[in-house]
Image (cartoon, helix red, strand yellow):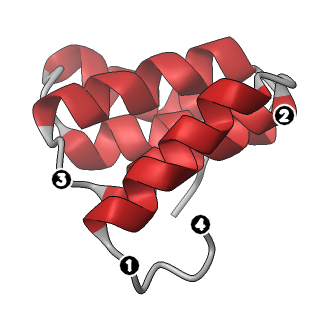
Amino acid sequence: MPRSPIYWDKAVKANPKDLHALYMRGLGWRDKKEYDHAIKDFTEYIRLEPSSADVCNWRGMARHDKKEYDKAIADYTEAIRLDPKLALA
C-alpha cells in the first residue's frame, strides 16, 4: 500500500473522517519530511479517535523530527497511557 500523501489526499478529500486515509497520508508526509502536514493529519485523526496510542506515537515522532521535544514527550506519554505495552513509545 503506497504511503504517498498525494495518493491518500483524494480519499481524505472524499471523506475527511476516513481514519485509514488520514493515517496513511500522515505517514507519507512524515516520510517526505513535511512534518507540519504530518502533525496536522495525525492531530485530526486523534481528534476523531482519541484512543489511538499508535497515532499519538507517530505524532510524537513527527514532533521529535521538528525538534519540538516537549510536545513529542507529551505525545509519547499519552501513547503509553493509552497502551502501556506500546514498546515503541
Could you tell me how far apart the alpha carbons at marks 4 and 1 are, in whole angstroms?
9 Å
Which quadrant would the C terminus be assigned to in this image?
bottom right
Say what secondary structure mark 3 lies in: loop
Would you identify the image quadrant in which residue 19 lies?
top left
Question: Where is residue 4 drawn, in percent x and y?
Answer: 63, 39
Q: From the viewer's perspective, is 24 left or right of 58?
A: left
Earlier residue among tags 3 and 1: 3
Residue at image point 47% right, 78% down:
86
Could you tell me how far apart the alpha carbons at marks 3 and 1 are, in whole angstroms?
12 Å
Q: Is residue 73 visible?
A: yes
Q: Nearer the viewer, residue 13 or 46?
A: 46
Dot 3: within a 10 Å radius of its alpha carbon, few (fewer than 14), some, or many (20 or more) residues?
some
Q: From the viewer's perspective, is 61 left or right of 85?
A: right
Residue at image point 65% right, 36% down:
72
Disc on res. 84: 1
Disc on res. 51: 3
Question: Where is residue 77 drawn, in percent x and y?
Answer: 49, 52
Residue underneath mark 2: 65
Disc on res. 89: 4
Say what secondary structure mark 2 lies in: helix
Dot 4: within a 10 Å radius of its alpha carbon, few (fewer than 14), some, or many (20 or more) residues?
many
Say what secondary structure mark 1 lies in: loop
Q: Amino acid at mark 4?
A: Ala
Q: Amino acid at mark 1?
A: Pro
Earlier residue among tags 2 and 3: 3
Could you tell me how far apart the alpha carbons at marks 2 and 3 are, in whole angstroms?
23 Å
Are the residues at dot 1 and dot 2 in contact (C-beta closer than 8 Å)? no
Would you identify the image quadrant in which residue 53 lies?
bottom left
